[in-house]
Image (cartoon, helix red, strand yellow):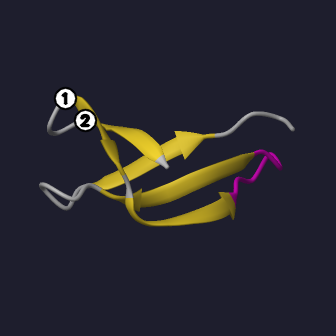
Amino acid sequence: MEGYCVKCKSKKEMENATKVTMKNGRAAMKGKCPTCGTGMFRILGKA
């Protein structure tokens, strides 16, 4: 899963990406940046 790293300011493939459910019920992917190790987050569509 690809996400945006705020620290590197670029799109990268997430490391250890896992699917999570937010408080409002929407799905999201949570992982780490392979370069700097910062936490990455991507909100998925409603489907």
Residue positioned 78% across, 45% down in the render: 26
Q: CA distance from mark 1 to mark 2?
A: 5 Å
- The reply to whether the magenta stretch includes residue 46 is no
Residue 6's tag is 2
Q: Is residue 8 left or right of residue 26?
A: left
Q: Secondary structure at mark 2?
A: loop
Q: Secondary structure at mark 1?
A: loop
Residue positioned 42% across, 61% down in the render: 31
Q: Amino acid at mark 2?
A: Val
Q: Position of residue 11 (x, y in %)?
A: 31, 33
Q: Position of residue 20 (x, y in %)?
A: 66, 62
Q: Is residue 31 left or right of residue 9?
A: right
Q: Quadrant of residue 35?
A: bottom left
Q: Position of residue 19 (x, y in %)?
A: 64, 62
Residue 9's tag is 1
When the figure is inspected, residue 33 is found, relative to residue 44, above or below; the finding is below
- Contact between marks 1 and 2 (CB within 8 A): the answer is yes
Q: Residues within 10 Å of mark 2 (few under 14, many from 20)?
A: few
Region rendered in magenta: 21-26
Q: Quadrant of residue 33?
A: bottom left
